[in-house]
Amino acid sequence: MTIALVILAAGQGTRMNSDLPKVLHPIGGAPMLVHAIRSGATLEPSRIVVVTGHGGEAVGQAALDYAPFVDIAVQEEQLGTAHAVLQARAALDGFEGDVIVLYGDTPFIQPETLEKMQAARATHDVVVLGFEAADPGRYGRLVMDGERLDRIVEFKDATDEERRITLCNSGVVAADAKVLMELLDAVGNDNAAGEFYLTDIIGLAGARGLSAGAVTCDEAETLGVNSRAELAEAERIFQARMRAEALSDGVTLVAPETVFFAYDTVVGRDSVIEPNVVFGPGASVESGTTIRAFSHLEGCHVSRGSVVGPYARLRPGAELAEDVKVGNFVEIKASRVDRGAKINHLTYVGDAEVGEEANIGAGTVTCNYDGVMKHQTRIGARAFIGSSTMLVAPVSVGDDAMTASGSVITSDVEPGALAIGRARQVTKPGLARKLFEMLKKQKLKKSQEA
């Protein structure tokens, strides 16, 4: 069956108390909207339409940054959910198949749930996603007649008996595109808010002899994010799922509750993740690696057998080959580190290539930025970079070469050579004692004058 997604992302989200549109607030390092797109994308839809409104330009750009193939529709006036879906009409022109309506601020709908809705379309013209609520509160209620969905009743319009119903409306709907548009055209706004509600299509469908049904999911999937507190709860749920998935995949998390994943983090089995590790977007770790405590990885790739940390930072473009050792207080950015190289402590490597089995001493810096442009550093295989070496890029240190500790290297070092770039030490016997005596006298004189 051909599928199209319509994702509603036009809400202002005033309860977020933010200049940022609600659907752009991040969960797991990605906007909520991206999570909704990812979930629906598992159905391999032929079209995805994102309906924007408040902050529409930023919301549309965020959608296109993640999925360049999406269409953007704009709801100029916020006249309700039915009106919002109608804004996708032009983008769906010529489409024949089912439309599933999702929400940009409801990021946890699972692919399996959408597949259930898709399957239910075989017996119902319109399918609504419901959930059994622990506290139904002010949710709309799904009034069932056996397997048939009779109507959706908003809390404020419900009788006491209807309010005792715990099967609640998520707002997610699936229907044939042509049927959906015909029903939406018939929705009125004769209500207290003067808005066009998507839920009204159920009553309209019944009046036309069409069948409506409901499928259910876990309540956590339907969590809508409307406030900072709900955003924090959404992050908690997301992290709990990611940790459980990692453990199930054979990853050791020494202290699971202290490890934080991004939406696209990949960690291979038999890897060990120590406490207080944070993965930003774009990080992938192969099997059999160790990420030690208090490390931060983003936009990087770590190959099998490598050890990173503790207190290491891998920034975007960091590419570690097999069996690399990156130690405490090391930062690597936009650099390739080849097999077996060691960068053990207090070092910055940026815009560089580090050859296999090279050893980078403590306090080394690749001086890659001249204030205007970035420049490359190349360190050859088996090179030994002495502690506190400043490599002023662009510069190359050849295979099997060495730099003396404390050197400032401004010219290329040929393979096998030793480079020394520091001033000759001069020792003045007794001068330190004389200087201290002079300084103490100056300090005493200043205190007396004061």
Image (cartoon, grey):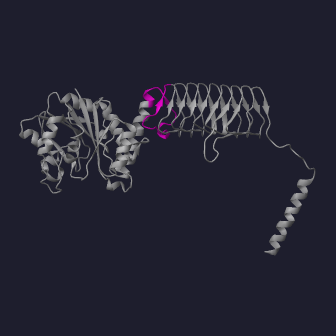
Compared with 353, 19 (above or below) is below
Residue 112 placement: quadrant: top left
Residue at 37 percent of width and 44 percent of height? 61
Extreme residue in the front direction? 372
Q: Is residue 283 magenta?
A: no
Task: Decide if residue 447 is on the left or right side of residue 36.
Answer: right
Q: Nearer the viewer, residue 158 or 327?
A: 327
Q: Residue at horizontal 16%, vertical 40%? A: 181
Residue 213 at least partly seen = no
| Quadrant assignment, res 309 | top right
| Quarter that holds the C terminus | bottom right
The percent coordinates of residue 4 (x first, y second) are: 25, 33
In the rendered image, residue 287, in percent from the top left (x then y), is placed at 52, 25
Task: Judge from the rendering whether residue 262 lies leftward or rightward of residue 145; answer left or right.
Answer: right
Residue 11 pos. (x, y %): 29, 50
- Identify the residue at horizontal 50%, vertical 34% (top origin): 283
Judge whether residue 2 can be spotted in this image: yes
Q: Which residues are magenta?
A: 246-269
* Depth order, front residue of 221/179: 179
Q: Position of residue 427 (x, y in %)?
A: 90, 47
Left or right, 308 with respect to 192, comes to right
Question: In the rendered structure, does residue 256 fall within the stretch colored magenta?
Answer: yes
